Amino acid sequence: MNVHDWLMNMPIADVADECKVIEVSFNNGSRKDFFRNTTLQQFEKGDLICVEGVSGFDLGEVSLTNEIVRIQMKKKGVDEGNPEMKKVLRRASDRDIDTWRHSKSREKDALIRSRAIAKQLKLEMKVSEVEIQADSRKATFFYIADGRVDFRELIKIYASEFKLKVEMRQIGARQESAKVGGIGSCGRELCCSTWLTEFKSVNTTAARYQNLSINQTKLSGQCGRLKCCLNYELDTYLDALQHFPDNCDSIQVVKGNASLIKKDIFKNLMWYVLPDSNKQYPVTIERVKKIRSLNAQGVIPEELEIAEITSSKIKEVEPEFVELVGQISLRSLEKADKKRKQKQQQKQRPQQNPQQQRGQQQNPNRQQGNQQRGPNRPPQQPRRDK
């Protein structure tokens, strides 16, 4: 939920007209609110400050200041002159930070205990998060429920169990996913937990327009609903589909009625399937319009005229030389591996005595003669003349 302050270095014409409202984030950015700065101190992004809470104070982090706060307030429909807007008390001291950390350490145990109590009362709800105020005087329980839940008895038990004021706030599955966070199938952090603040309705028609298979396991996000990113490219697909002819789900040729399978907006092709065949045939938009007009006149063409598809992939050619930047080929690596294996095999072989090797090199004929006489006969002594 980070926002870049692109108006940070803009000069202010009138100091009296400077925005006195600060945006403060709580619980690592999962909740934000606006507070009026009535103090004489100037705060910057990242400062820990104490603000007014419910019969006490709360501690948060400054997320935005100055003129960009007015843009955020206009976007969310908040009036800058609202007299009921809460105020900034002071800069957080060490004692305030210690109290805030102690309150945050209680949230995990409170979440486990609150879920157990709701289960004992057999309420159809799920407590997803517990946020305790910095001074431990109030706790907000965020829950998910499909219908209306009567939690009057639950609030009494929570108040007596945790010794604080209780506020119940219902959220949706998408808001829970934003609070929990995680990594999506694209490999990036979830949009709802980083920058997405408004959740629009997503249905399966968005997937049909984009020629996606209706597979709930692939189209659903971590919240269990359809992914919000299905709406990102929907307008582009709708604009591209305006050039395709309507009422062309089935066209007639001599071989039978060709049924439309999909539309390729990138290559402007329409794929058809003939009866008694599973093969798909790409046809251009102009050819489909012509066949449609001929069918309206009662003329049945002989064939579809399949369009030629050229591959846009570029074949990667492996370089046969070593460049100055250090680029090497896989073949050179394989050669190096072979040489390394040969050296290891030579080292593993038993090494002979160097004197034996020298004798074998000087008298090779003597060894051959001994082999011919046999292993049991002694070698002949050399003849000496007297």
Image (spheres, rainbow, N blue to C red):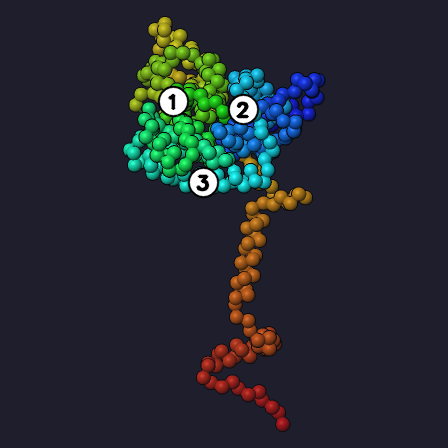
Which residue carries the number 2 mark?
86
Which residue is situated farthest in the front direction here?
Answer: 55
Q: Is residue 74 left or right of residue 307?
A: right
Hey, what amino acid is under mark 1? Thr
Whether 324 is drawn above or below 224: the answer is below
Whether 131 is drawn above or below 281: the answer is below
Q: What's the distance in space between the residues labelled 2 and 1, CA to CA?
A: 43 Å
Which residue carries the number 1 mark?
204
The x, y position of residue 330, in whole percent, is 56, 46
The reply to whether dot 2 and dot 1 touch (C-beta < 8 Å) is no
Q: Quadrant of residue 230?
A: top left
Give the residue at x 48% y 39%: 103
Tag 1 or tag 2, which sits nearer the N-term? 2
The x, y position of residue 79, in whole percent, is 54, 16
The reply to whether dot 3 and dot 2 touch (C-beta < 8 Å) is no
Circle 2 or circle 1, nearest the eye: 2
Is residue 158 or residue 305 the one in the foreground? 158
Hey, what amino acid is under mark 3? Arg
Whether 332 is drawn above or below 221: the answer is below
- Residue 326 can be seen in this image: yes
Which residue carries the number 3 mark?
106
Q: Quadrant of residue 246?
A: top left
